[in-house]
Image: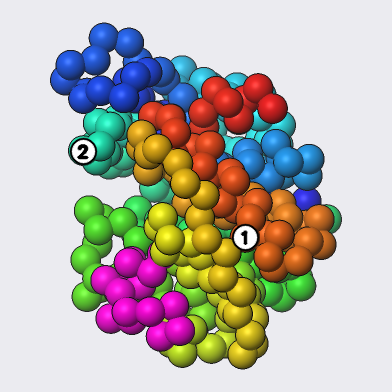
Amino acid sequence: MLLAAGETMAMVAPREAERLHAADAFRVDAGGAESNVAGHVAALGHPAAWFSRLGADPLGERILQRLAARGIGVSTVIRDPGRPTGLYVKDPGHGVHYYRAGSAASFLCAADADGVDLDGIAVLHVSGITAVISPSAAEFLDRILTRAREAGVLVSFDVNHRLALWGPETAGAALKSFAARADIVFVGRDEAERLWGTATPAEVRALLPEVVELVVKDGPHGATTFTGVDHVFVPALKVEVVEEVGAGDAFAGGYLAALLDHATIDERLREGHARAALVLATTADWPDEVEEQ
């Protein structure tokens, strides 16, 4: 089983690929890096669960219903009656607007990590977003990584640097430290260059030599996985991009599902690209095309 842990918010996006201010029809869905990954893993036939905090409010309930419908286990999610569920709004092609200050997820803490049951968990998936939403959430991330390593659980970490939340001068060292503690790391070549000044996938590998399986994504060009001194590159699929947000999560979900299938590195990369292509073609983090599979 895969367990994903981290913030999920209610996501509002225009149904069509049009600017937010001009749209008349919207979708209200669940969106979060870690739960997105869990959803793709579940869609590909593997048990997956998600842990976090949500407000005890209608948006929190909507998120739970949406994730459960995707086959994600949500029974251990904490409902917080004193804090709201976070919200973000997409403006297709022009970024995302976040309304998460004081959200329930920002109050994740080390004690929450101590309460997570890791029995039967093969892979723990987390991301760098948790490290920045609050100091207590960073402590949660630190503690759950430590517990997973002690329990022999494979740790997957998506760097997921969010420039709007913290600049590279602060984020670089912190995200490198978390990445070095993981077994599998996903990072975009462009974000690695922004964070660490590494211009090529090989330079990223030189910076993180201890990571057993390092996946460097290079947008429309493709992705490279480094294992030891070996590496495998698979080009991305050609797709007409509607919205990029969520595609990295889809890639990670496809890749990890293939890993759980004991697929080759080449097959893991191909499955990652296939899932990413589905999300790139829609305004949602979780497109209708995926729901119907």
Residue situated in front as seen by the camera: 260 or 167? 260
Q: Which mark is residue 278?
A: none
Where does residue 111 sit, x and y in percent of width and height? 56, 57
Residue situated in front as seen by the camera: 45 or 119? 45
Task: Relative to 138, say whether 28 is above or below.
Answer: above
**Picture quadrant of residue 78:** top right
Task: Relative to 113, say whether 20 is above or below.
Answer: above
Which element is circle 2 on?
loop
Q: Please, what is the three-letter code of the amino acid marked with disc 1? A: Leu
Where does residue 215 sit, x and y in percent of width and height? 54, 69
Q: Residues within 10 Å of mark 1 (few under 14, many from 20)?
A: many
Chief SS of the magenta region: helix
Rendered residue at 52%/20% (across/down): 62
Cα distance between the residues tagged 1 and 2: 28 Å
**Picture quadrant of residue 242:** top left
Residue 159 visible in the shown view: no
Q: Is 202 one of the magenta-colored residues?
A: yes
Residue 282 visible in the shown view: yes
Which element is circle 1 on?
helix
Rendered residue at 21%/38% (across/down): 94
Horizontal arrangement in the rendering, residue 45 relative to residue 26 (left or right):
right
Residue situated in front as seen by the camera: 26 or 223? 223
Task: Relative to 217, say whether 207 is above or below.
Answer: below
Q: Which mark is residue 94?
A: 2
Residue contact between numbered discs 1 and 2, judged by CB atoms under 8 Å = no
Q: Is 116 one of the magenta-colored residues?
A: no
Start and end of the magenta stretch?
Answer: 188-203
